[in-house]
Amino acid sequence: CGMFAHKYPKWVAKLHYGEKYFAFDGVKDLMKFYFNPLKWGKYTNATKDKITSFEVTDYYKQNSVDGFKAFYVIRSDIYGPMGNELIPFDKLEDAKTFQKDHNGKRILKFSEITENIPYELDSK
């Protein structure tokens, strides 16, 4: 989207490709890039099979966690820099607590996030 991720350290998400990485201002925008990097530019080397790590910022602990293993709450009353967001947590129990406290609609594992979900979050 063109926003600067460094302005939003509480929301930073990164896709690593070896020693290079792309930083995003939230998981939602990262997922848009993950599913279709060529939509955003000539990122021919940014394919899923070349990802060496995926970091997200745990909402409660504010530390970096493995995005492939994280749990994501969607449609809560907490918004990120770009509005509705996939709110990441390292532990399922933390995601459940957040879901209850902030009216989250669902908890998703990474494997359950489909290409359409980030765009659906934009259309609240």
Image: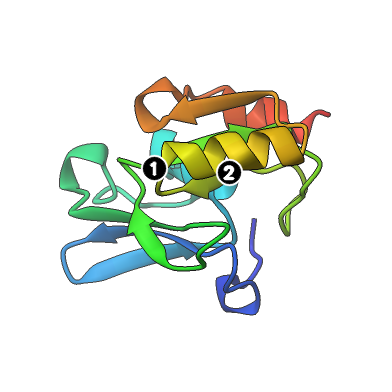
The amino acid pointed to by label 1 is Ala
Ranked by sequence position, the earlier of labels 2 and 1 is 2
Quadrant location of the N terminus?
bottom right
- Which residue lies under the disc numbered 2? 28
| Mark 1 nearby-residue class (10 Å; few <14, some 14–19, many ≥20) | many
Residue at mark 1: 70
Q: Is residue 39 visible?
A: no
Please tell me the numbered disc located at residue 119: none
> Counting other residues with Cα less than 10 Å from the Cα at mark 2, is it few (<14), some (14-19), or many (20 or more)?
many
Task: Write the residue at 71% across / 31% down.
Answer: 104
- Could you tell whether 100 is left or right of 72 in the image? right
Residue 29 placed where, x, y %?
57, 48
The amino acid pointed to by label 2 is: Lys
The residue drawn where x is 35% and y is 57% is 65
Which of 80/61 is in front? 61
Q: Secondary structure at mark 2?
A: helix
